[in-house]
Image (cartoon, grey):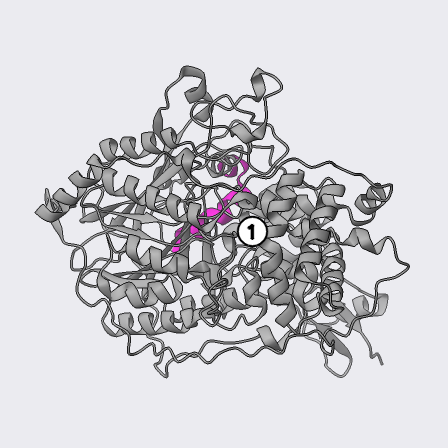
Amino acid sequence: MTARRIIAFSMIIIIGVLWRALEIEALPTVNFFGQQNHINWTQSEDRWDIVSIPRSIKPHVDLSQKNGNRTNPLVGQDHEAEFLEHLRQLKYNNPSSWPRMLWQESSNNNNGLVNKALKLFNLKQVSYEIENSVLSKVSCTACKAGAGLLLHYIHTGKSQQEIIKMIFHFCANLNIQSPRVCEGVSTLFGSEVIYVLQRTTLGPDEICSFVIGDGCGDVYNPYHEWDVVFPPVPKPAVTEAAAPKDGAPFFKVLHISDTHYDPHYVEGSNAQCNEPLCCRLSSGRPENPNSRAGKWGDYRKCDTPKRTVDNMLSHIADTHSDIDYILWTGDLPPHDVWNQSKVENLEILKETVRQMVEKFPGVPIFPALGNHESAPVNSFPPPFITQDDNSISWLYDELDVQWRRWLPQSVSNTVRRGAFYSVLVRPGFRIISLNMNYCNNKNWWLLLNSTDPATELQWFIYELQSAEFSNEKVHVIGHIPPGHSDCLKVWSRNFYKIISRYENTVAAQFYGHTHFDEFELFYDPSDLTRPNNIAYIGPSVSPYYDLNPGYRIYYVDGDHDHTTRLVVDHESWIMNLKEANLYGYPIWYKLYAARSAYKMKALRPVDWDNLINEMANNQELFDLYYKNYWKNSHLRPVCDAECRKRILCDAKSGRSHDRRQFCYSVEWKVDDDAGKSWKSWFYRGLSNSYVLPFNPAKIDIFWAYSQYSPRLLVTEKLIILLKKQKRQPLSGHQMPLLLTCNKYK
């Protein structure tokens, strides 16, 4: 998950330069394309050849049958056993000795204009909107003003040091965060943002539309409009997936996501600090006993202590000893984004890999990269950024070393290029891991050029086309769900087209990032009533925040002649954090199994679509889903009709920033079930309506397809004219929202 609170204050710190605007009568008019200090920057040519790189064509995982209906991993080889024994004998360095960046508290000099700035730009509202991914004109206005001033200072000759210092003072003086957080963020993020803005030709409107999305308008930007290219191969006829047969062989798969392991978590420390991450010695003294961090974690702004990660992995190894392989979808470091370094993030990567190797010897693990693995967070420069101080090779090279424990050598080229890879797991079954940070709209490097960064999507098409030729089924894994608001609209749109083209090949998708227990559906772009793919979004291990720790178990259609490779069923397991801290020991238990809990015949896309429609009409069923969505947290808020519409809309939105296309049907159903609005009355009336054939010379009929502002204009003359016509039934997909009569005899 992107730490939404943290992203909020990171963005607001940049917006904090608005304070300066209060000292001048008006914002300066800046020509962003013709300033003297703009750096003429040209992207280096990329000669990477997709076809020439090695591919995984030999099955990587050797699984044997168990009881004729299971698969089970083979015992590891001798050299692997020796290696694991060597690991057990190693004495790990004390995590508390890892280098940290700590700053002294500085004085807070408030100014009389602070309250005016807070009131004018409503920074608290901006923080709330970014944190909850529900952005409005409030965030857009603040973003445009902040971006405009930053560009002004850059193009009028302010040095990088001056701008970073200015951002720090604004952050501290506006009480946006503590002084040390302000200093850390301005230092870590400032140089990167300034580097990008010095080289971009975009203005505030384009920048904020790019970063915020629909909440800031759909501003046309030719530099960020692009389409992938498909090979000249006709799409095979769509075959309706049959439900997997009961009793057929299956794989048992573990899905772990968003661990956010915090090596500096301290039991009894302050869990209610004024910073984005608490429960550390540096968080200050707790004001009262209720403010103390729990032994096994805390529901407040705290990440996962080592003892909880160890306990969970031990529980999984004991309870699910028959796991066939593991999906590990990223976000390993904690949420102290103002206080991170490349060295520490690499240490956390190595430590968590050691934990996985020790707990699951011989079990194949397929990892994906999260947005928190980089330092600073969300910073993933494309391959054309090659300068040593900005290149991402420090992370990708180490990922190749660590991931090679489970992956074949053939993936090295793509992992070092962009942290994505493709592996043939079994004959006819492939896993493709994508780096979803190239769709992350918080990745400022994409402002320079968002056109298929690292050529990842074009490579993805090549892999899927090869899989189609070979009659392989594919599972796609990643971190940020492609329909989430954190994913760039243009990237998500292209990804959606790829999934539609290869819907016969892609059997399922698996992501994390949100920390909730949920899913996303994909639909045929030419027929949005036909679901064609499913993305499973696994729960987080981290309780950040107000959540119980959790993980998922999938049962995947296994090796047999008629396998679909679909998910047959899945279970979500959690630990009740409140009880664990109260009684001193955690108990992990199965919260629910999808098919039995929701009474589903199977877990095909059409079955999930039916569930969404049922939840729109059935409050009791939705309440069950909502409880599981929050991992049975006792702190989950009450979900009213608007909340219900948002969650169901999220489930229908496999394409980001396009909710109007997907959400109207569930929204009016929820309103109808609540019986609360004129919209319910209107749609009920339409369901029993008839449309009459009109003489085009007399009447123009305009058909609309919007759920937001339906209007029906009927004049007295029109009613008389309609009565003279012969009635015809209204077709199911047409919705007469506006009738106008412009010609009469």
Question: Residue at (44%, 61%) from the top-left corner?
Answer: 392
Percent x, y of residue 351: 33, 42
Question: In the image, 285: left or right of 208?
Answer: left
Percent x, y of residue 13: 68, 49
For the record, the magenta segment spans 605-622
Asked whether 609 falls inside the magenta stretch, the response is yes
Percent x, y of residue 498: 42, 69
Percent x, y of residue 347: 38, 45
Residue on which the image places disc 1: 649
Question: Residue at (63%, 40%) from the top-left corner?
Answer: 180
Question: Residue at (66%, 47%) from the top-left corner?
Answer: 129
Depth check, front residue: 135 or 141 = 141
The quarter in which the C terminus is drawn is bottom right
Q: Secondary structure at mark 1?
A: helix
In the rendered image, which quarter is residue 183 located in? Answer: top right
Residue type at mark 1? Cys
Question: In the image, 705: left or right of 271?
Answer: right
Taken as a whole, is the magenta stretch helix, strand or loop? helix
